[in-house]
Image: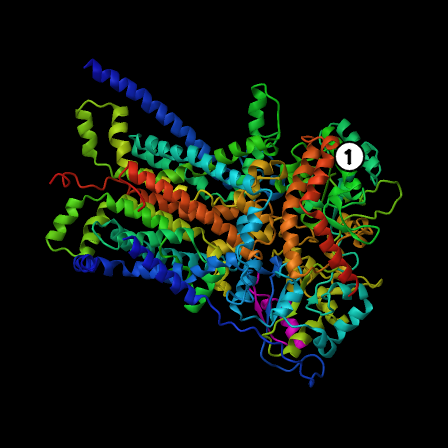
């Protein structure tokens, strides 16, 4: 009986092994042909270019494909290039991406975060034969992209691999568009307390104390349970440090959580927690709970997104309290009058870009399509649509959406209208536009927030470095451990369950034992290569 | 006489306590759905300000349901899921019954090895990518059949059904076999009718599982018109959540950020809740009285 | 042996034919892709494919085993599963017995239906409710304060986490899990109850000597199936309920792997951990199955 079982089992295993596929060949990149028949847009009719891209959430509410939107219908007229859109289900981009990789039938263009989400990084994506190196292609078919990159050497550096290859047509968060998150406070309550907008740690303490004295027991709230929000704590950045790797003033990479500045942040924040200025349920507060506290007035300050939070809290709060108003405050500093050196902003390039895969047959067509939206005309079209139909330019040269967009009759939201007539409000492979961000942000508080939240942080946030695949693996292994430990202890210091004076040295020693120095070496090596691009 | 009366008082108290406890359990179990229902018809902006227990709607608004109703894919989603549900459940029960019947027989030489090989699949799988590539090689990707056929047997359900079939008295089956009945006749005319309750349970398990599933649909379907209901609802949820709005999104006074997640639960759940009461009628005694001793 | 097989074939030919589609199903859909489990021993990249991805031996396993948190994760996963089993398993049986005891058909059906409703509420919504109950101004703290205790943020306390997890698990699943036992209760011959009553047995005695033995095979099978899933505790609920303050009791294997970032990109690592879990599960099941074979008539094989 046993023998029979084993025999059958072995047969089945062998069957399985036979099917372990090995028939996929990796494509060798075809040399770019030198002859081009381009005579300007619109191009002549030809087979469609397939484009894999995550659909904006404002699009899928009303259209099942981006190709059905009025924008892309107009784009077809202007460029002459037909697009066959392929969309992953919302929320499932990573799984779909992996399946397409395994499948081997890559679409012509794929919009994806090649920097963070391709295992091994963009250089490996090229080496694996998935996407094409774009240097030649830019030279031959993308004059607009080339011109833009020449005018912005910083962005140019960010979007290349260490050995100088372009791997995608990027989405660039241009100047001013990346500051969509920051500290905010109830301006009506500030007025009521007779206080100015706080700009330093001491001023914040003063304001929060005053709020507490007036009956708001725990004035500061935060979605601390969300990792990103926890990491982007303005009251930490004030101490010129960061919750992970960052570029310090000596232009090398440091690890924030083991440095003095971080300790001072913890001590200060622990004090605020002890005195009840921060909500006692801080670590477990869900988004809904923070929303409740901020809209009902139980807290008066938090740090959050300009759109999803400020934009929804204000109308909700005003429903029951017409005086309710939130305004952005600058990222706090230690000294009065200082420009904030540290803070948070989205990086100009976070890795999202449209790559041309090795299965693309008509490379020129795909490249020209992407290049169109980098021309002045194409870019304006991308962000604002058609002149005098969807936008107007006023006497000062400011762009404004027309009533067609802002006062729609179909019951669609502003976001959905913009998504129908432009490609402005989702991840697209072109450079962003602060004019759009401010137009889209309907409330004055929101428009101002973008500027109020500016800092010099781009000098200090980690740029898009690319460690080698092996280094990445080592880094992942070491950092998962360290991050778990660091987060646990930091929170315990804040809550007071661990005494920071007693345990700080052990905490730092433990992190060193877990290999932070090795991790720092890897990061600095990658940073050096980055600077030498 | 006295003995009977004593017992019946004791039993009465016991029954009373039993019912009281059950009512308590019912209230505790009813609360989540009541909360969801009430929240779904509340006004989103007012709901944002609410914390704690909710017994009545705050404000009144059907906006969340309208958002769901107006999604172009919603009726397609229902149709697709209905198809998979009906065809899938029937095939599932059929195939699982065949397997459970086989595994419940005695004196079958290869029964144990086959059982072991089936149980092994509960522990060792190839993972998402090899499973997908397998479907691709069988030309099942991008089809609704690809969501039905590879999932026809759930091993846990198979084992549960086998237990059910094992409870059918051997003597009944033997006498039928002696009378010349084929295994198919035994299965369909004797075993299945006597296992109504267990079949009802396994049917419930399969149909709920099919109704709730969205993951494989998201993996193998390229054509959005084939998306099942849950996948569409998931997208609606993500589109409208506070995090789904673009980071630099403008305000939306018609926001349904808070209420949409409750509305999607109601839309997703109510239909399937109707299946169970329908199956409840099979929860009756299945054993033929007197047949056992015969 | 050959003789035995040919005898068996003669006798059971039609049975084997009957089960053929089932066997084919498993071969085609379960065994054909099973080579994928070996991804655990490779440095897998979907673009390269299975055969072109290089072998790395036990590298992925050692990465997991050498983690400072290895034992903590195993302990947390194991304990949470065992507590849910220890408390939740009997709870659903008891609920089934209680419902079964009700004479009134309408009440019976109503309670049955209501009790399984929480199972259908999405986890995100349920965890939102749990968070609301556990906050310092929430319901549970209201009760604590009423009895003179001090209010505490419950979801920050590692000592409370397991209680919260297990109790909410029972709340959500008790009704759904009782369904199978209700079905099994139907299959007990009513004549057995008659006979017991005639012999003078009261309700309790009937329970002990007729009911429980009647559903014992079902209980054992469900128990075995649960043991076979012990280490596979999913991450969804944990991710929604935990935070670094409670990592020491809340962080389980799947949530740790999830945090190692981009679970879809770390194919080899997550497959290796999954394989490890499967081996432990299988071992536990084999032990449990052996014991159930020894001490009862029911077992998986």
Q: In front here: C157 or B232?
A: C157
Q: How many marks?
A: 1
Q: Position of residue B51 (x, y in %)?
A: 60, 35
Determine whether the residue tagged by mark 1 lies in a helix, strand or loop: helix
- For residue B83, side relative to residue A395 (left or right): left
Q: Residue under mark 1: which chain is it in?
A: A
Residue range in magenta is: A62-87
Q: Residue at x 51, y 32 (%)?
A: C163
Residue displayed at 70% across by 60% down: A466
- C242 relative to A166, above or below: above
Location of residue A376 (image quadrant): bottom right
Is there any visible trace of residue B41 in the rendered image? no
Q: Is residue C146 shown left or right of residue B190?
A: right
Does residue C241 belong to the magenta stretch? no
* Disc 1 residue crowd, few under 14, some 14–19, many 20+, Cα 10 Å: some
- Indicate yes or no whether the magenta region holds residue A77: yes
The residue tagged 1 is A268
* Identity of the residue drawn at 70% across and 51% down: A519
Relative image position of residue B69 (x, y in whole percent): 51, 54
Between C275 and A279, the residue placed more toward the observer is C275
Q: Can residue B102 be seen here?
A: yes
Q: Tell me what residue is drawn at x 28 percent, y 61 percent.
A: C20
* Res. A398 image quadrant: bottom right
Camera-nearest residue between A250 and A43? A250
């Amino acid at each position: 009986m046993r023998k029979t079982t084993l025999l059958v089992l072995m047969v089945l295993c062998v069957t399985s092994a036979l099917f372990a596929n090995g028939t996929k060949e990796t494509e060798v990149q075809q040399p770019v042909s030198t002859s081009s028949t381009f005579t300007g847009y619109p191009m002549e009719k030809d087979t469609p270019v397939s484009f894999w891209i995550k659909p904006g959430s404002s699009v899928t509410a009303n259209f099942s494909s981006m190709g059905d939107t009025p924008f892309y219908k107009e784009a077809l007229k202007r460029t002459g290039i037909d697009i066959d859109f392929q969309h992953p289900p919302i929320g499932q981009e990573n799984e779909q991406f992996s399946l397409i990789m395994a499948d081997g039938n890559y679409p012509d263009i794929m919009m994806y975060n090649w920097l963070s989400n391709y295992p091994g990084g963009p250089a490996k994506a090229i080496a694996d034969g998935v996407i094409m190196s774009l240097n030649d292609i830019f030279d031959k078919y993308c004059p607009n992209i080339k011109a833009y990159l020449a005018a912005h050497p910083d962005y140019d550096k960010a979007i290349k691999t260490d050995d100088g290859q372009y791997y995608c047509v990027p989405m660039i968060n241009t100047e001013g568009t990346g500051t969509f998150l920051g500290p905010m406070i109830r301006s009506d309550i500030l007025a009521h307390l007779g206080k100015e907008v706080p700009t330093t740690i001491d001023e914040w303490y003063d304001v929060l104390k005053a709020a507490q004295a007036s009956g708001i027991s725990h004035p500061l709230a935060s979605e601390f349970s969300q990792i990103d929000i926890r990491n982007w704590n303005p009251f930490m950045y004030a101490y010129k440090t960061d919750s992970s790797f960052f570029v310090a003033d000596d232009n090398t990479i440091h690890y924030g959580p083991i440095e003095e500045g971080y300790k001072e942040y913890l001590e200060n924040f622990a004090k605020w927690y002890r005195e009840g200025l921060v909500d006692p349920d801080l670590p477990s507060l869900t988004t809904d709970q923070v929303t409740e506290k901020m809209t009902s007035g139980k807290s008066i300050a938090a740090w959050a997104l300009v759109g999803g939070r400020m934009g929804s809290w204000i109308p909700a709060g005003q429903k029951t309290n017409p005086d309710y108003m939130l305004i952005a405050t600058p990222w706090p500093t230690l000294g009065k009058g200082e420009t904030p050196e540290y803070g948070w902003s989205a990086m100009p390039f976070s890795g999202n870009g449209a790559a041309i895969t090795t299965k693309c047959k008509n490379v020129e067509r795909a490249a020209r399509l992407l290049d169109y939206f980098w021309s002045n005309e194409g870019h304006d079209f991308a962000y604002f649509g058609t002149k005098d139909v969807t936008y107007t330019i006023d006497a000062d040269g400011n762009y404004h959406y027309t009533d067609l967009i802002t006062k729609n009759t179909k019951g669609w939201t502003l976001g959905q209208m913009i998504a129908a007539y432009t490609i402005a409000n989702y991840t697209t492979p072109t450079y962003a536009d602060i004019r759009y961000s401010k137009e889209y942000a309907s409330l004055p508080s929101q428009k101002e927030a973008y500027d109020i939240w500016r800092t010099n942080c781009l000098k200090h946030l980690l740029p898009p470095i690319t460690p080698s695949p092996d280094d990445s693996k080592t880094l992942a292994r070491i950092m998962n451990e360290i991050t778990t430990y660091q987060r646990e202890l930091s929170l315990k210091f804040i809550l007071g369950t661990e005494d920071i004076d007693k345990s700080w040295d052990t905490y730092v020693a433990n992190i060193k034992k877990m290999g932070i120095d090795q991790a720092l070496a890897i990061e600095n090596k990658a940073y050096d290569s980055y600077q030498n691009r | 006489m006295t003995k009977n009366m004593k017992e019946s008082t004791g039993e009465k108290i016991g029954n009373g306590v039993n019912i009281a406890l059950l009512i308590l359990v019912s209230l505790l179990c009813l609360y989540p759905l009541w909360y969801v229902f009430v929240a779904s018809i509340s006004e989103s902006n007012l709901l944002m300000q609410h914390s704690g227990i909710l017994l009545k709607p705050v404000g009144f608004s059907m906006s969340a349901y309208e958002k769901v109703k107006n999604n172009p894919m919603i009726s397609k989603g229902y149709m697709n899921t209905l198809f998979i549900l009906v065809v899938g459940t029937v095939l599932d029960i059929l195939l699982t019954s065949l397997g459970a019947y086989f595994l419940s027989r005695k004196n079958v030489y290869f029964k144990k090895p086959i059982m072991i090989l089936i149980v092994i699949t509960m522990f060792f799988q190839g993972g998402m990518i090899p499973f997908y590539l397998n479907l691709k090689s069988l030309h099942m990707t991008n089809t609704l059949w690809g969501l039905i056929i590879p999932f026809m047997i759930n091993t846990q359900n198979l084992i549960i059904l086998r237990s059910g079939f094992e409870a059918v008295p051997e003597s009944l089956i033997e006498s039928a076999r002696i009378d010349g009945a084929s295994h198919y006749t035994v299965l369909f005319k004797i075993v299945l009718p006597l296992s109504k309750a267990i079949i009802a349970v396994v049917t419930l398990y399969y149909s709920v599982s099919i109704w709730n599933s969205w993951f494989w649909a998201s993996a193998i379907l390229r054509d959005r018109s084939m998306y099942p209901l849950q996948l569409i609802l998931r997208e609606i949820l993500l589109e409208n959540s506070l995090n789904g709005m673009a980071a630099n999104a403008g305000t939306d006074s018609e926001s349904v950020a808070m209420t949409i997640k409750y509305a999607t639960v109601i839309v997703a759940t109510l239909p399937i809740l109707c299946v169970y009461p329908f199956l409840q009628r099979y929860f009756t005694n299945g054993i033929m009285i007197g047949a056992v001793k015969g | 042996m050959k003789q035995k097989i040919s005898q068996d074939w003669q006798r059971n030919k039609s049975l084997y034919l009957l089960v053929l589609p089932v066997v084919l199903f498993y071969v085609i859909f379960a065994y054909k892709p099973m080579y994928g489990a070996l991804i655990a021993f490779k440095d897998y990249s979907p673009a390269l494919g299975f055969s072109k991805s290089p072998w790395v031996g036990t590298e992925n396993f050692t990465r997991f085993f050498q983690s400072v948190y290895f034992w903590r994760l195993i302990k947390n996963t194991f304990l949470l599963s065992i507590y849910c089993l220890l408390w939740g398993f009997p709870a659903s049986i008891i609920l089934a017995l209680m419902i079964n005891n009700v004479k009134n058909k309408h009440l019976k059906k109503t309670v049955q239906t209501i009790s399984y409703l929480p199972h259908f509420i999405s986890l995100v919504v349920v965890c939102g409710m749990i968070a609301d109950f556990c906050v310092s101004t929430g319901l549970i703290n209201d009760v604590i304060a009423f009895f003179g205790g001090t209010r505490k943020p419950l979801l920050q306390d590692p000592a409370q986490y397991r209680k919260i997890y297990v109790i909410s698990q029972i709340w959500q699943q008790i009704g759904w899990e009782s369904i199978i036992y209700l079905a099994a209760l139907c299959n007990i011959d009513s004549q057995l109850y008659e006979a017991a009553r005639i012999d003078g047995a009261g309700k309790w005695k009937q329970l002990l000597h007729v009911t429980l033995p009647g559903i014992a095979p079902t209980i054992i099978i469900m128990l075995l199936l649960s043991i076979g899933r012990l280490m596979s505790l999913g991450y969804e609920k944990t991710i929604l309920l935990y935070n670094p303050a409670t990592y020491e009791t809340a962080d389980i294997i799947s949530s740790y792997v999830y945090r190692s970032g981009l679970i879809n990109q770390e194919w080899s690592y997550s497959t290796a951990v999954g394989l490890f879990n499967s081996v432990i599960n299988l071992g536990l099941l084999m032990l449990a199955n052996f014991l159930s074979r020894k001490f009862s008539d029911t077992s998986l094989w």
